Amino acid sequence: MGRAWLGLLGLFTLGGPAACSSARTLPGAGGVGGVSGGSGGTGASGASEASRTAAPLRPICGGTQSAGAAPSCAHANELTLTNPTSRNPNGGALRAGDGVTLGVALTNASGQSFPYPCVGFAADGPGLVFSGQNPVFTGGYAMRPGETTTVEINGQLSASIAAGTVVHVTAWVDSLHAGCTSGATISWAINL
């Protein structure tokens, strides 16, 4: 029982046994460990690469999926993620060993409030480790129609990442303890 999931990396299918776990496989992205990967700089990416073999995990906001939380996801596909950013919090270009702040703008384009909004982040390789809670809970009870907020997460780039490395990052919409799989996604390339 798969669900179609459209991201900037292409059309992929999500579902199966992972649908009941506290982390889901992110389709279309390779790498190890799911919440790690990375490098610096920014750029939009619209292509999937054949070199991707293992998909990173897609953790659930709040850590576990609650029974009865599925209705919270009903309008997750009507929210949008735009303006992806990757920056060095200390300024300058991103290099191996630097901290990195990733961010996206989350907008509720639906006509209804969206409960307990979260945005998750994953990268396609082991060179970026995110710090703090991932997915990031925006802290609000509900996101009103037309509302936009910026959601950011910090991470650390591995000192062993080679110059010229390109890592693909994906962000997705979730709701606290819901594990939404049909929500908006955005993917972008980070160039080191």
Image (cartoon, rainbow, N blue to C red):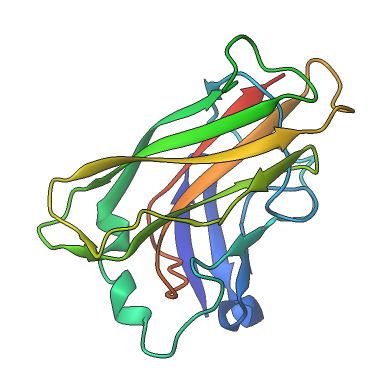
Residue 7 sits above or below residue 49 on the image:
below
Which residue in the rendered view is the most extreme toward the right? 160
Q: Is residue 106 left or right of residue 118?
A: left
Q: Position of residue 129 (x, y in %)?
A: 72, 44
190 and 54: which is toward the camera: 190
Q: Does residue 169 appear to the left or right of 103 in the view shown?
A: right
Q: Is residue 48 visible?
A: no
Residue 161 location (% of width, % of height): 84, 27
Q: Is residue 157 left or right of residue 19?
A: right
Instruction: Say which residue appears at 56% left-offset and 31% top-offset.
Output: 101
Whether residue 171 appears in this view of the structure is yes
**Quadrant in which residue 155 is drawn:** top right
Residue at the extreme front: 90
Write the residue at 56% across / 56% down. 134
**As drawn, which residue projects farthest toward the left?**
111
> Could you tell me residue 47's position as x and y percent?
59, 33
Number of numbered discs: 0
Q: Is residue 166 above or below residue 112?
A: above
Residue 96 picture location, percent across and down = 79, 22
Q: As rendered, which of 33 and 77 lies closer to the eye? A: 33
Q: What residue is drawn where x is 36% and y is 80%?
A: 70
- Seen in the picture, residue 115 relative to 26 is either above or below; the reply is below
The C terminus: image quadrant: top right
Can you say whether 34 is above or below 153 in the image? below
Of residues 143 and 191, the one nearer the viewer is 143
Seen as rendered, the residue at the extreme bottom is: 67
